[in-house]
Amino acid sequence: MTTAPAPTTTPAPVVPAPSPAPRRPLLDWRIRFGVLSLIWGFSFLFIKVGNEAFAPLYVTLGRMLFGTTVLFAVLAVKRERLPRGIRVWGHLAVSAFFLNALPFSLFAYAELTIPSTLAGICNAASPLWAMLLAVVVVSDDRPTRQRVAGLGLGFIGVLIVLGAWQGFSGQDPLGTVLALVASASYAVGWQYVRRTLAGTGASHLSMSGTQLLLGTVQLAVVAPVFAPTPGSFPTLPLLSVLALGALGTGVAFLIQYGLVAEVGPTTAMMVTYFVPVIATAAGVAILGEHLTWNTPVGALVVLAGAALTQSRPRGTRPKPTKA
């Protein structure tokens, strides 16, 4: 659903303090990368189905609640404590707003009027927003010319998918703007996290769990005021919200941080470019959303940009991550 934010809908967890080298994962990072792409790609479909029975704020609240449950279950198994300090919890509350409560809600509202395929594509703009922020915000991971070219190529791919030469005909402007603002929120949140929450001494699991908990509280306060309370719980929309939270938020957080720790944030960020491809395939195959020639062509351009962004100058090695 992260230089750069994690995608997605995903939902971007916070940057933890340095920790001892983890044991070698059972699954190769490429397999976990693919699983994460599938989970976040299908998240937009889950949002669309959830919107059929629940108000967007309650879709987001359910997502946060089920995601928090997953992380706290893992915390209990590992017997890890939550981070301490009012200051840390305050920063986590802000990061929960920009990385979870706000973008999740905006994507849910956007999908009231735009297809899930378009929402997934707008999510791919997160690294572009992050690059723009890197120009004005001090960053230890400024983009190189090659990576900027890759991000630019990825942006062109997004425009091709949207059919920019046709004036985005048939797309709801407000819904599209909401989805793009959601993707920008991830970039803002990550810059905030990197400047305030590095070196706390807490594990990524406890930090992420606390972040989701605070985001859930925020939604629990706001949702009853601004949205009608669900009067019934149809099976399919309820299962979609459950999958959106448990998989798209809880499990995805665990996979994402494992990737960041193993291959670095820049490579892990590339999942952002695969999400729209999965979201498009799911929307067309399952929801019957319309697909034109420019969508697969644009997707290929996006993937080419992603490959270029991953490249590094010879003789350089990625900086160690704070995961």
Image (spheres, grey):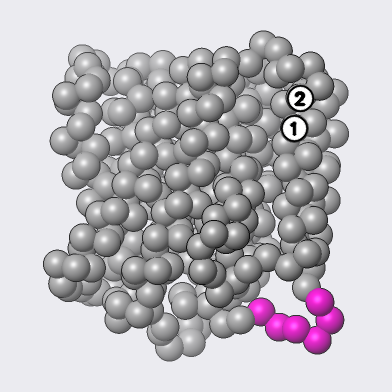
Local SS, label 1: helix
Looking at the image, do the residues carrying marks 1 and 2 touch, with CB atoms under 8 Å apart?
A: yes
**Would residue 230 be found to the left or right of residue 22 on screen?**
left
Type of amino acid under label 1: Leu
The region drawn magenta spans 313-318
Instruction: Using the rendered view, name the quadrant where residue 195 is placed.
Output: bottom left
Local SS, label 2: helix
> Which residue occupies the foreground of this view, 8 or 20?
8
Can residue 248 be seen here?
no
Against 310, is 301 above or below? above
Could you tell me residue 213's position as x and y percent? 24, 52
Q: Marks 1 and 2, Cα distance to the nearest angstrom?
A: 5 Å
Type of amino acid under label 2: Ala
The crowding category of the residue bearing disc 2, from other C-alpha atoms within 10 Å (few below 14, some 14 to 19, many at least 20), is few
Could you tell me residue 95's position as x and y percent? 34, 55
Which SS type dominates the magenta stretch? loop
> Which residue occupies the foreground of this view, 288 or 56?
56
Disc assigned to residue 159: 1
Q: Is-magenta flag for residue 316?
A: yes
